[in-house]
Amino acid sequence: MKVLIFINSLGAGGAERSMVEWAKFLKEQGVNVKFVCLERRKVGVEDEVLNLGLDTIYLDQRNKGTLNELKFIIGVIKKEKPDILHSVLTKSNLILRLSKVFINQGHLIQSLVSTPYSLERKKDNKLSWKKFLVMKQIDKWSARLTQNIFYHAITHQVLHHYYHLYKIKENFEIVYRGRKENQFCHEKKSPNFTIINSGRHEFAKGQIDILKALVYIEKKYNIKDIHFELLGREGEYTSTLKEFILTNNLSERVNLMGFVTNVEERLSKAHIFIFPSYYEGLGGALLEAFAAKLPCVCSDIPVLKEVVGKKDGALFAEPGNYQEIGEHIVKLYKDDNLRLRLSDYAYMRYQNKFKLEEINSKMLSMYKKVIGE
């Protein structure tokens, strides 16, 4: 079996992390696997991929633009002659669909990993709504007009998001993402009571609401010893976060760590994981928190309810409601027994649903199904 994995870049997101783990597994199984990337990122998993000995083909960065990207993809497919073309993220999915007009080589699998057309995005004042609607139509019609796409959805909610848009029929399978065991989850906690979040600095992640919650807690309860670590690369909302931290005198209690390689260790030392996203596909960072045995405060959105699994498996807050997030933080700050109960549940949920080895086996079975083995 020869597999090409098409992805926008080997950046620092959850999709990139998941596909690196998947490619590593394929290589261990003796599968000929290569990444094909449209962009290069200074921050991300490129070095890890190189160290793992995974082959990667990059678009010459002087040749950006849809037409050049299409020519690049077609050239790679002609040369490599893969059995499976597996794409991830909207841009790579779109370019690969267009390539099928010119070359019909291999079985096409496209991973659906987010819910990008959520109406919550209207709250993002940095988003051009007209451009958003145009891209949605292009995405819709390119999917409907391309023959023989097999869709891999990472949750039921993601499938539901795309089901009617793409007119998906029986050509899909739902396989969750997985994460490795956390080797540090038995270590001692930080001496400071620490809440933690992991994700790029973008509107969708709602990290500004964690900062607002800290201010709310200080004003209402006079609690000033809760520290916050934010792990993840800079993005569109980095300047907004930094400005809020300075304006509200949070610098001594809030640490923007940027992209780090010791995520597992930092999670294990924290006391609570906060996940206030406005929309998600699954939330790989939440799985990492589960593996680290962390009690979680999550946005009350369908996809995170699906991932958590039951109503009292985490504390849920309405997206954007920083007061409710703050109340949940205080509740966990004061109640050791509640933290322990949610910690035990989080780890049990990880063990039952999101262990990487079991997810990889399901993905491999999906591949074999698609190629008829």
Image: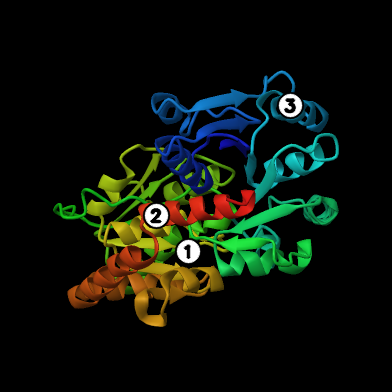
Q: Nearer the viewer, residue 247 or 371?
A: 371
Sequence-wise first label, 2 or 1: 2
Write down the residue under mark 3.
78
Q: Amino acid at mark 1?
A: Pro
Residue at (85% x, 53% y) in the render: 145
- In the displayed orientation, state which residue is furthest to the front: 373
Q: Amino acid at mark 3?
A: Lys
Element marked by disc 1: loop
Is there a contact, CB below 8 Å, between mark 2 and mark 1?
Answer: yes
Q: Is residue 331 above or below residue 372?
A: below
Write down the residue under mark 1.
276
Sequence-wise first label, 3 or 2: 3
Residue at (26% x, 68% y) in the render: 343
Quarter occupied by residue 172:
bottom right
Q: Nearer the viewer, residue 55 or 46?
A: 55
Residue 81 position in % (x across, y down):
68, 30
Q: CA distance from mark 1 to mark 3?
A: 44 Å
Q: How many marks?
A: 3
Q: Is residue 101 left or right of residue 190?
A: right
Write down the residue under mark 2.
197
Query: Mark 1 or mark 3, which is nearer to you?
Result: 3
Residue at (60% x, 24% y) in the render: 57
Quadrant that contains the N terminus = top right
Q: Is residue 275 above or below residue 332?
A: above
